[in-house]
Image: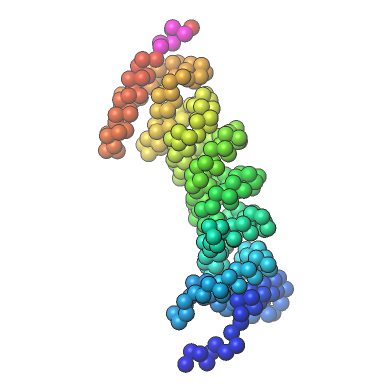
Amino acid sequence: MSFLFKRNPKTPQELVRAVCESVVKLDSNSDSTKRYQDDCSRYLKQMKGILVGDDENMPQPDQISYLSQEVYVTDCLYLLIYHLKKLDFDARKDVQLIFSNLLRRQIANKSPTVDYLINSKPEIILLLLKGPESQSTGLICGQILRDCIKYDSIVKFILGNSLFWNLFKYVQIPIFELSTDSFITLHDLLTTHKSVVIGFLTSNYDQFVLNVNKLIQSANYVTKRQSIRLLSELVTEKENKEFLTKYFDDPTNLKIIMLILNDKSKNLQIEGFHIFKFFIAKPKKSQKVLDILTKNKENFIAFFKTFDIESYQDPNAIEERNYILQTIQELPDIERIN
């Protein structure tokens, strides 16, 4: 009997236009706002049904095509993201699902939604980047943005935009869920498409290291540990050759990692060790780095002789510690370079 409730269903095009009209009316602040919210929710559910099917119907390629084209023509995604905080919780989740399904849609090895975002409406990506500024919609925006980050052209666009640097501020938001979500996004941007990131790190070395070093010195334990782990992941990528050379030749970076080695947290010490070892193992050290290592030679020897790495039950780490200790012992004494 369910067919009795499905008379004169809207076409995909009509659905898209209807949700656009309803979401814009949410700005009216009238007594009808609740009705417009309900309309948006209903239309979004029907759009979701076209894209993923429901209990009675499988997705139909032609219906999906009609809906997708109308979404692009009407800038429906922009309207939905712009007005996202005015939708109810279930409607926001439907927006996420609709957005993600449109992103995955491919035609002859091309992603029309990705092309639309980059070439026609990049403002949508910028709105998503600003997501953490809203507590009510920040997590939804973060989830959608990470779906976008799966595509290298979008990562390249984001890394080339000044709003990218706001993520370093968002990861320090006092609201734990938003700060954690922002860090996941930052991590994915810098690790998902390595060929794109290589050029970015090379061209933006000074600004990137300045920002990541601030996070490493944060008073927040979680922020500090996540940041060191991210940096450790980046410095183990041999493809980042120019970035690595600059980073490990910089005495400021060495001093910051030395502070981490001296942190009261054993977990932070081990994270710091995994970066410090590269300063030691680098065959050709800059003179400033070599001077610091030599000046602190005896302190390093005393530290690593008692460095409790065995409790982590990582045989590789123990071997690395022993190698680093031996290499430090082979450094020239301070008297020889005076």
Residue that appears at 55% across and 67% down: 98
Residue 62 is situated, as x and y percent measured from the top left of the image, at 56, 74
Query: Where is residue 307 drawn, in percent x and y?
Result: 32, 29
Residue 218, position as x, y percentages in the image: 52, 39
Which region of the structure is painted magenta?
Answer: 332-337
| Quarter of the view holding residue 315 | top left
The answer to which of 25 and 2 lies nearer the viewer is: 2
Q: Can I make out residue 297 in this image? A: yes
- The residue that appears at 59% across and 57% down in the rendered structure is 114
Main SS, magenta region, reads: helix
Q: Compared to 138, does 35 lie above or below?
A: below
Magenta segment: does it hold 293?
no
Instruction: Tell me residue 35's x, y (percent).
Output: 64, 80
In this picture, residue 75 sits left or right of residue 298: right
Q: Is residue 334 magenta?
A: yes
Does the rendering let one see residue 223? no
Which of the pair 180/62 is nearer the observer? 62
Of residues 207 and 63, the one nearer the viewer is 63
Rendered residue at 61%/80% (across/down): 11
At horizontal 65% and vertical 78% (from top left) the residue drawn is 14
Residue reaching furthest to the front: 108
- Number of marks present in the image shown: 0
| Colour treatment of the image | rainbow
